[in-house]
Image (cartoon, rainbow, N blue to C red):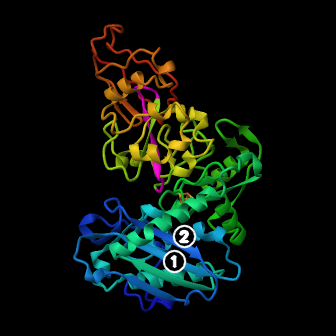
Amino acid sequence: MAGEGMFTDIPVEIGVVFEGERIRKQSMHAELGGPSVSEKFELLEVVPSGDITDGTVHLIGPDLADMEPGTVTPFAIHIRAAGASLEGDMESVMERRIHDFCNWIEGFMHLNQRNAIWLRADKRSVGKGLSLRHVGIVLARLYKSALPIIDEIEVTLITDPGEVRARYARALGIYEQRDARSRGMTDEDVDVFYGCSLCQSFAPSHVCVITPQRYANCGAIGWLDGRAAARVDPKGPIYEIPKGECLDPIAGEYEGVNLVVREKSLSDISRVQLYTAFGYPHTSCGCFECTTFYVPECDGLGIVNRDFRGSTPTGLTFGTIADSTGGGRQVEGFHGLSYEYMRSPRFLQGSGGWERVVWMPAAVRAQLKEYIPDGLRERIATEEDVTSVEALMDFLRSREHPILSTREQAPAIPESVEQSPGRAVLPAKTGAGQNPGTGVVVTFRNVTIRADRIFVNRKMP
Ligand code: SF4
């Protein structure tokens, strides 16, 4: 805790107790990065010893006290670390700890990762004197105390928009180099996967299972990163998962994965299938870069990314869909994803892969164009093509999307059926006349129904 030991010079408390603290707009003093800022990033690089001065904190741009209350600004955190046993492979995992350590600061919130970071400082902590320089000092000390493998560390915080912009492209290039390292490896090539429980402070039953062909949901940790982290700190939040027997090669179910996920989720989750959005999908915390959403009218999947500001054809925004997806649950059809997993040949192979995808934002479709199979790319609608489910269905028909080859044989869903994630609300009478008792005909295809409780009540005359 702050005020004691290593943080006596910091004006707010420091401790794990503040993890999970949310700062609402009304109580924020400043927002650093976030969805309304296009350029923001965090980056940790391993550098040769001697290139940095240990413990130095640089601030480029105004500090919190210089900002008007309610300020929203581009932001970057750039950490450089050196150590005799540090390897470049460990950068991603060490970088991900920025999330934990920032969240240990009272009145300071950190969400997401890489170039999606979103931080807030609250008015009360800034009123107590919290500055970005303090944030840098706390990061440097927590890194050295949690990861003794680091001998020297230097932290640079940037709020100057021009400086963030000048360094942004380089950060994106480094992320891409890291992601590209394990492309070409397959899940059959290895005997162990890696698990990560770093997000359990927000989603207690969530465990990321990281394989060569299934990058972590946050997009920040791949199999090689997991291997480096588990080697350095085998008792840490990233650990080996011996694969064990493969129970289902298409859906991606492994005996060893089930065992470890059951243990780490305290038996909340007993089965996980790695390559599917249905059945027993991989859990989602809240850090996913993108998420799928189910489109019942065509039995297809939409994909929406965190930066998408509009509504999907179902009328739901990323935020609403993310609420249905996250929290460490298994929600069929609502499935957190990283961009890198969408580049994988295993991408949702148990749910039909790319042939199941019917909608995605134009920016994401363009970003992944070389990974979407030929002949399918232009059959996936974007917000530039459709803005409603009806228009989506017309689009899919006009482009002969393969999802329709099975779907079109099914009866149309009545117009008066109201749909929302995980729920279909049927009106009392549709006037269809096929069922004299209710006037409703319901057709389910390829559906799994799970209910905690069912109530059957006699209808009184
Ligand atoms: S999203 Fe997964 S891999 Fe990324 S930090 Fe959270 S638990 Fe770890």
Would residue 282 appear left or right of 162 to someone viewing this image? Answer: right
Q: Amino acid at mark 2?
A: Glu
Q: Few, some or many C-alpha atoms within 10 Å of disc 1 (few <14, some 14-19, many ≥20)?
A: many
Q: Is residue 353 visible?
A: yes
- The disc placed on residue 145 is none
The quadrant in which residue 95 appears is bottom right
Range covered by the magenta-colored residues: 287-299
Verify whether residue 294 appears in magenta: yes
**View quadrant of ligand 1:** bottom right
Residue hosting label 1: 79
Q: Earlier in the sequence, mark 1 or mark 2?
A: 1
Q: Is residue 450 visible?
A: no
Residue 363: x and y in percent read 41, 47
Q: Amino acid at mark 1?
A: Ile
Residue 233: x and y in percent read 68, 71
Residue at left offset 57%, top offset 74%: 45
In front: 403, or 331?
403
Contact (CB < 8 A) between labels 1 and 2?
yes
Verify whether residue 359 appears in magenta: no
- The disc placed on residue 95 is 2
In front: 54, or 417?
54
Residue at left offset 34%, top offset 15%: 440
Q: Image height check: is 134 above or below 275?
A: below
Q: Few, some or many C-alpha atoms within 10 Å of disc 2 (few <14, some 14-19, many ≥20)?
A: many
